[in-house]
Amino acid sequence: MRSAPANPADLSCPMPLPHEEHIVLGHGSGGTLTRRLVRQLFLQAFDNPVLRKGDDGAVVPMPPGSRLVLTTDAHIVSPLFFPGGDIGRLSVSGTVNDLSMMGARPLWLTASFVLEEGLPMDDLRRIADSMRRTADEAGIVIVAGDTKVAERGKADGVFIQTTGVGAIPEGREVGGAKARSGDAVLVSGPLGDHGLAVLAARGQLGFAIDVESDVAPLNGLVEALFASGAEVHVLRDPTRGGLATTLNEIAVQSEVSITLEESAIPIRPAVASACELLGFDPLYVANEGRLVAIVSAGAAEAGLEALRGHALGREAQRIGLVEPGPPGRVRVRTRLGTTRVVEMLSGEMLPRIC
Protein backbone atom coordinates (compact mmCIF):
# COMPACT_ATOMS: atom_id res chain seq x y z
CA MET A 1 0.00 0.00 0.00
CA ARG A 2 1.68 3.18 -1.15
CA SER A 3 0.54 5.23 1.84
CA ALA A 4 1.48 2.66 4.48
CA PRO A 5 3.59 4.10 7.33
CA ALA A 6 7.28 3.33 7.53
CA ASN A 7 7.02 3.20 11.31
CA PRO A 8 5.00 0.24 12.67
CA ALA A 9 4.24 2.30 15.77
CA ASP A 10 1.72 4.19 13.62
CA LEU A 11 -0.52 1.13 13.94
CA SER A 12 -1.46 2.35 17.40
CA CYS A 13 -3.24 5.45 16.06
CA PRO A 14 -6.96 5.90 16.94
CA MET A 15 -9.67 4.05 15.07
CA PRO A 16 -11.61 5.98 12.39
CA LEU A 17 -13.64 8.95 13.59
CA PRO A 18 -17.48 8.69 13.54
CA HIS A 19 -17.72 10.61 10.24
CA GLU A 20 -15.58 7.87 8.67
CA GLU A 21 -18.20 5.18 9.05
CA HIS A 22 -18.51 5.16 5.25
CA ILE A 23 -16.12 5.55 2.34
CA VAL A 24 -16.03 9.13 1.02
CA LEU A 25 -14.32 10.51 -2.08
CA GLY A 26 -11.53 11.91 0.11
CA HIS A 27 -10.42 8.38 0.94
CA GLY A 28 -9.13 8.19 -2.65
CA SER A 29 -7.38 11.57 -2.65
CA GLY A 30 -3.95 10.31 -1.63
CA GLY A 31 -3.96 12.66 1.38
CA THR A 32 -4.72 12.34 5.07
CA LEU A 33 -7.91 10.30 4.67
CA THR A 34 -6.20 7.85 2.33
CA ARG A 35 -3.27 7.48 4.69
CA ARG A 36 -5.61 6.93 7.62
CA LEU A 37 -7.60 4.30 5.68
CA VAL A 38 -4.46 2.40 4.72
CA ARG A 39 -2.93 2.69 8.19
CA GLN A 40 -6.00 1.85 10.24
CA LEU A 41 -7.67 -0.76 8.03
CA PHE A 42 -5.51 -2.32 5.31
CA LEU A 43 -2.20 -2.36 7.18
CA GLN A 44 -3.85 -3.72 10.30
CA ALA A 45 -5.44 -6.49 8.22
CA PHE A 46 -2.42 -7.39 6.06
CA ASP A 47 0.52 -6.35 8.28
CA ASN A 48 3.85 -7.94 7.33
CA PRO A 49 7.46 -6.69 7.15
CA VAL A 50 7.40 -6.10 3.37
CA LEU A 51 4.17 -4.09 3.40
CA ARG A 52 5.18 -2.19 6.53
CA LYS A 53 8.09 -0.51 4.70
CA GLY A 54 5.60 1.70 2.87
CA ASP A 55 7.45 1.77 -0.44
CA ASP A 56 5.97 1.96 -3.95
CA GLY A 57 6.84 -1.67 -4.63
CA ALA A 58 7.74 -4.86 -2.81
CA VAL A 59 11.18 -6.44 -2.93
CA VAL A 60 10.70 -10.16 -2.30
CA PRO A 61 13.02 -13.19 -2.54
CA MET A 62 12.39 -16.05 -4.96
CA PRO A 63 13.28 -19.70 -4.26
CA PRO A 64 16.52 -20.62 -6.07
CA GLY A 65 16.20 -22.75 -9.20
CA SER A 66 12.46 -22.18 -9.55
CA ARG A 67 10.51 -20.63 -12.43
CA LEU A 68 8.45 -17.52 -11.88
CA VAL A 69 4.70 -17.50 -12.50
CA LEU A 70 2.76 -14.24 -12.58
CA THR A 71 -1.02 -13.92 -12.83
CA THR A 72 -3.52 -11.10 -12.50
CA ASP A 73 -7.28 -11.08 -12.03
CA ALA A 74 -10.18 -8.72 -11.31
CA HIS A 75 -13.05 -9.63 -9.01
CA ILE A 76 -16.64 -8.42 -8.98
CA VAL A 77 -19.54 -10.18 -7.34
CA SER A 78 -23.01 -9.21 -6.19
CA PRO A 79 -23.81 -9.48 -3.36
CA LEU A 80 -20.43 -8.85 -1.74
CA PHE A 81 -21.23 -11.44 0.94
CA PHE A 82 -22.84 -14.79 0.14
CA PRO A 83 -23.23 -18.21 1.83
CA GLY A 84 -19.76 -19.71 2.20
CA GLY A 85 -17.76 -16.66 1.19
CA ASP A 86 -17.41 -13.04 0.12
CA ILE A 87 -15.52 -10.94 -2.42
CA GLY A 88 -12.44 -10.89 -0.19
CA ARG A 89 -12.14 -14.68 0.02
CA LEU A 90 -12.98 -14.90 -3.67
CA SER A 91 -10.21 -12.49 -4.69
CA VAL A 92 -7.44 -14.27 -2.78
CA SER A 93 -8.63 -17.78 -3.63
CA GLY A 94 -9.03 -16.98 -7.31
CA THR A 95 -5.48 -15.71 -7.64
CA VAL A 96 -3.98 -18.50 -5.54
CA ASN A 97 -5.82 -21.03 -7.69
CA ASP A 98 -4.64 -19.50 -10.97
CA LEU A 99 -1.06 -19.90 -9.77
CA SER A 100 -1.69 -23.41 -8.47
CA MET A 101 -3.18 -24.56 -11.77
CA MET A 102 0.22 -23.84 -13.33
CA GLY A 103 1.85 -26.15 -10.79
CA ALA A 104 3.25 -23.15 -8.91
CA ARG A 105 3.52 -22.63 -5.19
CA PRO A 106 1.87 -19.25 -4.48
CA LEU A 107 4.13 -16.79 -2.64
CA TRP A 108 3.10 -13.16 -2.96
CA LEU A 109 -0.05 -11.19 -3.68
CA THR A 110 -0.87 -7.56 -4.45
CA ALA A 111 -4.38 -6.13 -4.18
CA SER A 112 -5.91 -3.01 -5.73
CA PHE A 113 -9.27 -1.77 -4.41
CA VAL A 114 -11.82 0.39 -6.22
CA LEU A 115 -14.23 1.49 -3.50
CA GLU A 116 -17.59 3.12 -4.07
CA GLU A 117 -18.38 6.30 -2.18
CA GLY A 118 -20.79 5.39 0.62
CA LEU A 119 -19.47 1.86 1.21
CA PRO A 120 -19.80 1.10 4.94
CA MET A 121 -16.39 1.01 6.60
CA ASP A 122 -17.46 -2.08 8.53
CA ASP A 123 -18.08 -3.92 5.25
CA LEU A 124 -14.62 -3.00 3.98
CA ARG A 125 -13.03 -4.13 7.23
CA ARG A 126 -14.93 -7.41 7.02
CA ILE A 127 -13.67 -7.93 3.45
CA ALA A 128 -10.08 -7.14 4.40
CA ASP A 129 -10.24 -9.52 7.37
CA SER A 130 -11.58 -12.25 5.09
CA MET A 131 -8.70 -11.67 2.67
CA ARG A 132 -6.19 -11.94 5.52
CA ARG A 133 -7.68 -15.19 6.79
CA THR A 134 -7.74 -16.69 3.30
CA ALA A 135 -4.16 -15.58 2.63
CA ASP A 136 -3.09 -17.20 5.91
CA GLU A 137 -4.93 -20.37 4.91
CA ALA A 138 -3.08 -20.43 1.59
CA GLY A 139 0.29 -19.43 3.05
CA ILE A 140 0.56 -16.40 0.75
CA VAL A 141 1.54 -12.86 1.80
CA ILE A 142 -0.14 -9.64 0.61
CA VAL A 143 2.85 -7.34 0.00
CA ALA A 144 1.54 -4.32 -1.93
CA GLY A 145 -1.65 -2.61 -3.02
CA ASP A 146 -3.52 0.52 -4.02
CA THR A 147 -6.84 2.21 -3.24
CA LYS A 148 -9.10 4.35 -5.40
CA VAL A 149 -12.60 5.71 -4.68
CA ALA A 150 -15.30 6.00 -7.35
CA GLU A 151 -18.32 8.29 -7.10
CA ARG A 152 -21.50 6.88 -5.65
CA GLY A 153 -23.30 4.60 -8.10
CA LYS A 154 -20.25 3.90 -10.27
CA ALA A 155 -18.54 0.91 -8.62
CA ASP A 156 -21.12 -1.51 -7.15
CA GLY A 157 -19.55 -1.41 -3.69
CA VAL A 158 -16.07 -2.88 -4.18
CA PHE A 159 -13.97 -4.09 -7.09
CA ILE A 160 -10.73 -5.91 -6.24
CA GLN A 161 -7.89 -6.51 -8.66
CA THR A 162 -5.16 -8.92 -7.58
CA THR A 163 -1.78 -9.96 -8.93
CA GLY A 164 -0.10 -13.13 -7.72
CA VAL A 165 3.47 -14.38 -7.87
CA GLY A 166 4.41 -18.02 -7.50
CA ALA A 167 7.30 -20.37 -8.13
CA ILE A 168 7.17 -23.67 -10.06
CA PRO A 169 9.39 -26.31 -8.44
CA GLU A 170 11.81 -28.12 -10.67
CA GLY A 171 10.32 -31.05 -12.56
CA ARG A 172 6.73 -29.83 -12.77
CA GLU A 173 5.35 -29.41 -16.28
CA VAL A 174 1.61 -28.82 -16.60
CA GLY A 175 -0.45 -26.88 -19.12
CA GLY A 176 -3.61 -26.89 -21.16
CA ALA A 177 -1.82 -28.32 -24.20
CA LYS A 178 -0.40 -31.37 -22.39
CA ALA A 179 -3.43 -33.72 -22.26
CA ARG A 180 -2.72 -37.03 -24.01
CA SER A 181 -4.90 -39.82 -25.36
CA GLY A 182 -5.58 -42.33 -22.61
CA ASP A 183 -5.33 -39.79 -19.77
CA ALA A 184 -7.91 -39.83 -16.99
CA VAL A 185 -10.03 -36.79 -16.09
CA LEU A 186 -10.50 -36.17 -12.36
CA VAL A 187 -12.58 -33.53 -10.59
CA SER A 188 -12.04 -32.64 -6.94
CA GLY A 189 -15.67 -32.35 -5.84
CA PRO A 190 -19.31 -31.50 -6.62
CA LEU A 191 -19.98 -28.90 -9.30
CA GLY A 192 -22.16 -25.79 -9.32
CA ASP A 193 -22.19 -24.95 -5.60
CA HIS A 194 -20.71 -21.47 -6.00
CA GLY A 195 -22.98 -20.33 -8.81
CA LEU A 196 -26.16 -21.45 -7.10
CA ALA A 197 -25.10 -20.02 -3.72
CA VAL A 198 -24.52 -16.56 -5.23
CA LEU A 199 -27.83 -16.61 -7.13
CA ALA A 200 -29.64 -17.70 -3.96
CA ALA A 201 -28.02 -14.83 -2.02
CA ARG A 202 -29.41 -12.41 -4.61
CA GLY A 203 -32.91 -13.81 -4.16
CA GLN A 204 -33.04 -14.62 -7.87
CA LEU A 205 -33.96 -18.30 -7.59
CA GLY A 206 -37.51 -17.81 -6.39
CA PHE A 207 -37.06 -20.59 -3.83
CA ALA A 208 -34.75 -21.51 -0.94
CA ILE A 209 -31.71 -23.72 -1.45
CA ASP A 210 -29.32 -25.04 1.19
CA VAL A 211 -26.02 -24.66 -0.68
CA GLU A 212 -22.82 -22.81 0.20
CA SER A 213 -20.14 -21.57 -2.16
CA ASP A 214 -17.14 -23.85 -2.55
CA VAL A 215 -14.74 -20.87 -2.74
CA ALA A 216 -11.34 -21.88 -1.31
CA PRO A 217 -7.60 -21.70 -2.06
CA LEU A 218 -6.58 -24.98 -3.72
CA ASN A 219 -2.80 -24.89 -3.44
CA GLY A 220 -2.76 -27.41 -0.58
CA LEU A 221 -4.86 -29.81 -2.63
CA VAL A 222 -2.52 -29.38 -5.61
CA GLU A 223 0.53 -30.08 -3.44
CA ALA A 224 -1.12 -33.27 -2.16
CA LEU A 225 -1.70 -34.37 -5.75
CA PHE A 226 1.93 -33.81 -6.75
CA ALA A 227 3.17 -35.45 -3.54
CA SER A 228 1.36 -38.66 -4.56
CA GLY A 229 3.77 -39.04 -7.47
CA ALA A 230 0.93 -38.95 -9.99
CA GLU A 231 1.94 -37.84 -13.49
CA VAL A 232 -0.11 -34.66 -13.82
CA HIS A 233 -0.53 -33.22 -17.30
CA VAL A 234 -3.22 -30.53 -16.90
CA LEU A 235 -4.71 -28.61 -13.97
CA ARG A 236 -7.59 -26.16 -14.28
CA ASP A 237 -10.17 -24.58 -11.98
CA PRO A 238 -13.58 -24.58 -13.71
CA THR A 239 -14.73 -21.07 -12.80
CA ARG A 240 -16.79 -18.96 -15.23
CA GLY A 241 -18.30 -21.24 -17.84
CA GLY A 242 -17.99 -24.24 -15.54
CA LEU A 243 -16.63 -27.69 -16.27
CA ALA A 244 -17.93 -27.78 -19.84
CA THR A 245 -16.14 -24.62 -20.95
CA THR A 246 -12.94 -25.58 -19.15
CA LEU A 247 -12.75 -29.00 -20.81
CA ASN A 248 -13.52 -27.51 -24.23
CA GLU A 249 -10.58 -25.15 -23.80
CA ILE A 250 -8.29 -28.06 -22.88
CA ALA A 251 -9.54 -30.20 -25.78
CA VAL A 252 -8.75 -27.38 -28.22
CA GLN A 253 -5.33 -26.63 -26.71
CA SER A 254 -4.29 -30.30 -26.64
CA GLU A 255 -6.01 -31.25 -29.92
CA VAL A 256 -7.79 -34.19 -28.28
CA SER A 257 -11.31 -35.35 -27.57
CA ILE A 258 -12.68 -35.75 -24.04
CA THR A 259 -15.51 -38.11 -23.12
CA LEU A 260 -17.27 -37.77 -19.77
CA GLU A 261 -19.44 -40.26 -17.91
CA GLU A 262 -22.56 -38.45 -16.74
CA SER A 263 -23.16 -40.91 -13.91
CA ALA A 264 -19.69 -40.17 -12.47
CA ILE A 265 -19.93 -36.35 -12.43
CA PRO A 266 -20.54 -35.23 -8.81
CA ILE A 267 -23.42 -32.75 -8.42
CA ARG A 268 -25.28 -32.22 -5.16
CA PRO A 269 -29.00 -33.15 -5.33
CA ALA A 270 -30.02 -29.62 -4.32
CA VAL A 271 -27.93 -28.12 -7.13
CA ALA A 272 -29.19 -30.66 -9.67
CA SER A 273 -32.82 -29.99 -8.69
CA ALA A 274 -32.40 -26.22 -8.81
CA CYS A 275 -30.73 -26.39 -12.22
CA GLU A 276 -33.52 -28.60 -13.55
CA LEU A 277 -36.17 -26.15 -12.34
CA LEU A 278 -34.32 -23.17 -13.81
CA GLY A 279 -33.34 -24.81 -17.08
CA PHE A 280 -29.60 -24.60 -16.33
CA ASP A 281 -27.00 -27.20 -17.23
CA PRO A 282 -24.83 -27.67 -14.10
CA LEU A 283 -21.82 -28.38 -16.31
CA TYR A 284 -21.77 -24.66 -17.18
CA VAL A 285 -22.30 -23.30 -13.65
CA ALA A 286 -19.32 -21.52 -12.04
CA ASN A 287 -17.15 -23.06 -9.33
CA GLU A 288 -14.52 -21.35 -7.16
CA GLY A 289 -13.10 -24.20 -5.07
CA ARG A 290 -12.86 -27.13 -7.48
CA LEU A 291 -10.12 -28.32 -9.78
CA VAL A 292 -9.94 -30.54 -12.84
CA ALA A 293 -6.84 -32.73 -13.08
CA ILE A 294 -5.90 -34.65 -16.20
CA VAL A 295 -3.39 -37.34 -15.28
CA SER A 296 -1.80 -40.31 -17.00
CA ALA A 297 -3.94 -43.46 -17.00
CA GLY A 298 -1.54 -45.27 -14.69
CA ALA A 299 -1.69 -42.43 -12.15
CA ALA A 300 -5.48 -42.17 -11.96
CA GLU A 301 -5.96 -44.19 -8.79
CA ALA A 302 -3.02 -42.59 -6.98
CA GLY A 303 -4.22 -39.15 -7.99
CA LEU A 304 -7.78 -39.85 -6.89
CA GLU A 305 -6.59 -41.21 -3.56
CA ALA A 306 -4.44 -38.11 -3.00
CA LEU A 307 -7.35 -35.77 -3.74
CA ARG A 308 -9.69 -37.67 -1.45
CA GLY A 309 -7.11 -37.57 1.34
CA HIS A 310 -7.34 -33.77 1.47
CA ALA A 311 -10.22 -31.88 3.10
CA LEU A 312 -11.03 -30.06 -0.16
CA GLY A 313 -11.04 -33.22 -2.27
CA ARG A 314 -12.94 -35.78 -0.24
CA GLU A 315 -15.67 -36.05 -2.88
CA ALA A 316 -13.29 -36.29 -5.84
CA GLN A 317 -14.28 -38.50 -8.76
CA ARG A 318 -12.84 -39.89 -11.96
CA ILE A 319 -15.25 -38.55 -14.56
CA GLY A 320 -13.82 -39.16 -18.00
CA LEU A 321 -11.20 -40.13 -20.52
CA VAL A 322 -9.02 -38.29 -23.04
CA GLU A 323 -9.24 -39.76 -26.54
CA PRO A 324 -7.37 -39.04 -29.79
CA GLY A 325 -10.20 -37.41 -31.73
CA PRO A 326 -12.01 -35.67 -33.14
CA PRO A 327 -9.78 -32.85 -31.82
CA GLY A 328 -11.40 -30.14 -29.75
CA ARG A 329 -14.59 -32.04 -28.92
CA VAL A 330 -16.13 -32.80 -25.51
CA ARG A 331 -18.87 -35.42 -25.22
CA VAL A 332 -20.94 -36.84 -22.37
CA ARG A 333 -22.09 -40.43 -22.26
CA THR A 334 -25.52 -40.15 -20.60
CA ARG A 335 -27.15 -42.47 -18.13
CA LEU A 336 -29.35 -43.73 -20.98
CA GLY A 337 -26.32 -44.85 -22.94
CA THR A 338 -26.57 -42.09 -25.54
CA THR A 339 -23.86 -39.53 -26.26
CA ARG A 340 -24.26 -35.76 -26.51
CA VAL A 341 -21.76 -33.10 -27.50
CA VAL A 342 -20.96 -30.43 -24.89
CA GLU A 343 -20.15 -27.17 -26.63
CA MET A 344 -18.17 -24.18 -25.41
CA LEU A 345 -20.38 -21.65 -23.60
CA SER A 346 -21.13 -18.98 -26.19
CA GLY A 347 -22.79 -16.37 -23.97
CA GLU A 348 -24.11 -15.80 -20.46
CA MET A 349 -26.15 -18.79 -19.29
CA LEU A 350 -26.53 -17.25 -15.85
CA PRO A 351 -26.61 -13.69 -14.51
CA ARG A 352 -22.97 -12.65 -14.01
CA ILE A 353 -21.72 -13.90 -10.64
CA CYS A 354 -17.97 -13.32 -10.67
Image: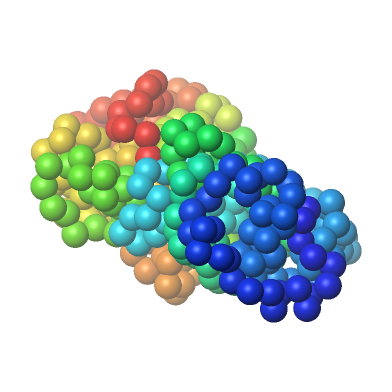
Residue 113 seen in the current view: yes
- Where is residue 283 shown, x and y percent of the image? 31, 39
- Where is residue 73 shown, x and y percent of the image? 60, 42
* Left or right, residue 174 beside residue 129: right
Residue beneath the point at 44% across and 39% down:
156
Residue beneath the point at 16% across and 54% down:
209
Up/down of 334 relative to 303, above or below = above
- Where is residue 311 shown, x and y percent of the image? 42, 72
Up/down of 238 relative to 249, above or below = below
Res 285 quadrant in image: top left
Q: Quick one: 307 or 288, which is closer to the camera?
A: 288
Q: Quick one: 10 or 349, which is closer to the camera?
A: 10
* Left or right, residue 139 beside residue 214: right
Res 340 quadrant in image: top left
Q: Quick one: 26 or 289, which is closer to the camera?
A: 26
Up/down of 296 relative to 45, above or below = above
Q: Quick one: 317 or 153, which is closer to the camera?
A: 153
Residue 216 seen in the current view: no
- Scheme of colours in the image: rainbow
Up/down of 26 relative to 43, above or below = above
Residue beneath the point at 46% across and 49% down:
119
- Where is residue 185 shown, x and y percent of the image? 44, 48
Residue beneath the point at 54% across and 58% down:
20
**Quadrant holding the N terminus:** bottom right
* Left or right, residue 163 beside residue 17: right
